[in-house]
Structures are given as C-alpha cells and as structure tokens.
C-alpha cells in the first residue's frame, strides 16, 4: 500500500502550506471559543438559560464555517477545481440548515427549565467539524473536536469555581381568595438571599386560584437558602395549595 508521502494527491493535504493554513484556522477557532465562553459566562451569571458551553460551541462553530470560505485554494488539498466541480458552499448551507432542524428537536422546555441547548449546540458544532474534514482541513477539524470535547467534559467541572449565582424556578398556586402582593413576595425573596429575575414573573388564574411562576436568582454564589429549606417554609404557608421548586437549568 503506497504511503501518504508517495501519493501527491494525499500529500497535498499535509503539505507545509496546508498545515500553516490549518494552524491559522485553529488560532481563529481558539479566539472565537474564548470570546464565546466569555459571553456565555456573563449570561450564565445572570441566570439565563444558555450557558458557557452553549455559547462557546456556537461561536466556535460559526467561526469554523465562516473562515473555511476564505481559503478555497486549499480545499481538498488544493484540488478543489478537480474534486469539486460544484460549488461546495451550497452543500455546506444545506448541511447547516438541516442540522439546525435536528438540533432544535432536542431542545425541550418545561416552565422556566430549558434542556438540550448544549446538546443542540454540540450537534451543530459536530456538523462544522464534518465540514472541515470534508474540505480537507484535517488538522483544524481535529483541533475543533478537541476543543468541543474539552468543553463538554471539563467545563462543567470548572464552573463551580467561578463566581456564579444559581437560579431556582418557582411555581406557587395559591388557595381560592388568597391574593398575594408582588412587593411582599420580592421582600420575602430578598430575606432568603434571592431576587426575582427581571421580567420572569408570570401570573395566571383559574377558578379563582392564582398561580405565580418566576425565577429566583441568588444574590451571590454563597447566598440563597437551599431548596429543602425553601420547601419546608412553603409547605407551612397556609395560603398555598401547591408549589414546585427546581433548579433552573439548561
């Protein structure tokens, strides 16, 4: 079996100019990843659904799909005109669009809890890795796969050491004729180390019973009563018919 070095077509994928180009792409991916993680940390700190992993993956994948269009002379080992008589960008657009629908299918929402965002972002990132492999940027593809794997495996272990504020999704259904007041609720949250996240409060009524839903955001990473303590207090409140507490997560 002939080696890669003895085959000019295969050797072109690992030529010096191709490796330099892949290295430059990797630097762009690392920079996009860092900026995405920064934005994601700010959103996670303020209790938003999408966190660092989601933003990091999406930003990096977007950079990958954008930068590869800038090096058409290096596609397919410099044999783009021979191996790709059809414009590959049209195929890439179709792939990204189709993967977008697939990713949307794994996102689920239940109240204030949204699950599947990171999975959807990782699916989309994997499509970008596949595109990089398809056009012949093997080194960049391996680097992006490494970055994505590190995000999925280790970032959630790092997040507890970063300054953060955990969020609690709260649902409270009051008994008939009980009319709660928002300012009283906000004050009670502050006394327990939480604040009600802006624009998260929703109120509904059915058969004379009001149901309040909101996200309680801890004032700091060390404040905020635990869920078990909050549950005990709510269970002792006579005006409540039912309640539900859960960590708001993505």
Image (cartoon, helix red, strand yellow):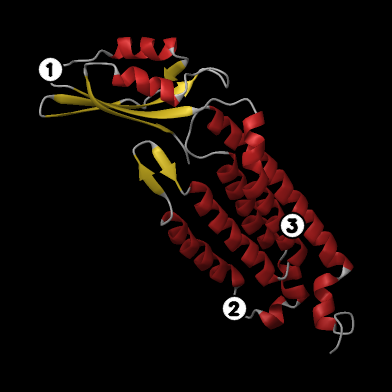
Residue 177: image tag: 1
Left or right: 181, with 167 as reference point? left
Mark 3 or 1: the one toward you: 1
At horizontal 48% and vertical 62% (from top left) the residue drawn is 97
In which quarter of the view is residue 163 placed? top right
Q: Badge 2 is on which residue? A: 86
Indicate the secondary structure of the residue bearing disc 1. Answer: loop
x and y percent of residue 149 in the render?
67, 53
In which quarter of the view is residue 13 placed? bottom right
Density class for disc 3 (Cα within 10 Å; few <14, some 14-19, many ≥20) is some
At horizontal 57% and vertical 19% (from top left) the residue drawn is 222
Is the Cβ of the residue at disc 3 closer than 8 Å to that at disc 1?
no
Residues at marks 3 and 1, CA–CA distance in whole angstroms:
61 Å
x and y percent of residue 28 in the render?
73, 50
Q: Badge 3 is on which residue? A: 143
Mark 1 or 2: the one toward you: 1
């Amino acid at each position: 079996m002939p080696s890669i070095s003895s085959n000019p077509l295969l050797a072109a994928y690992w030529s010096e100019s191709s490796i330099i180009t892949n290295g430059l792409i990797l630097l762009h991916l690392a920079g996009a990843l860092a900026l995405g993680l920064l934005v994601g940390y700010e959103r996670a700190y303020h209790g938003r659904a999408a966190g660092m992993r989601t933003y990091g993956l999406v930003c990096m994948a977007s950079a990958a799909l954008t930068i590869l269009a800038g090096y058409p002379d290096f596609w397919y080992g410099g044999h783009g005109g021979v191996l790709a008589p059809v414009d590959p960008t049209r195929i890439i657009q179709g792939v990204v669009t189709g993967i977008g629908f697939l990713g949307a299918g794994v996102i689920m929402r239940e109240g204030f809890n949204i699950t599947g965002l990171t999975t959807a972002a990782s699916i989309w990132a994997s499509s970008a890795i596949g595109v990089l492999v398809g056009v012949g940027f093997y080194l960049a593809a391996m680097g992006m796969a490494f970055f994505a794997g590190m995000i999925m495996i280790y970032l959630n272990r790092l997040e507890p050491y970063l300054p953060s504020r955990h969020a609690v999704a709260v649902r409270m259904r009051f008994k008939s004729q009980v009319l709660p007041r928002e300012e009283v609720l906000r004050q009670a949250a502050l006394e327990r180390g939480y604040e009600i996240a802006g624009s998260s409060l929703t109120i509904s009524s059915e058969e004379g019973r009001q149901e309040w839903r909101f996200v309680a955001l801890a004032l700091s990473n060390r404040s905020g009563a635990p869920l078990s303590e909050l549950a005990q207090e709510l269970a002792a409140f006579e005006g409540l018919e039912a309640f539900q507490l859960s960590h708001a997560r993505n």
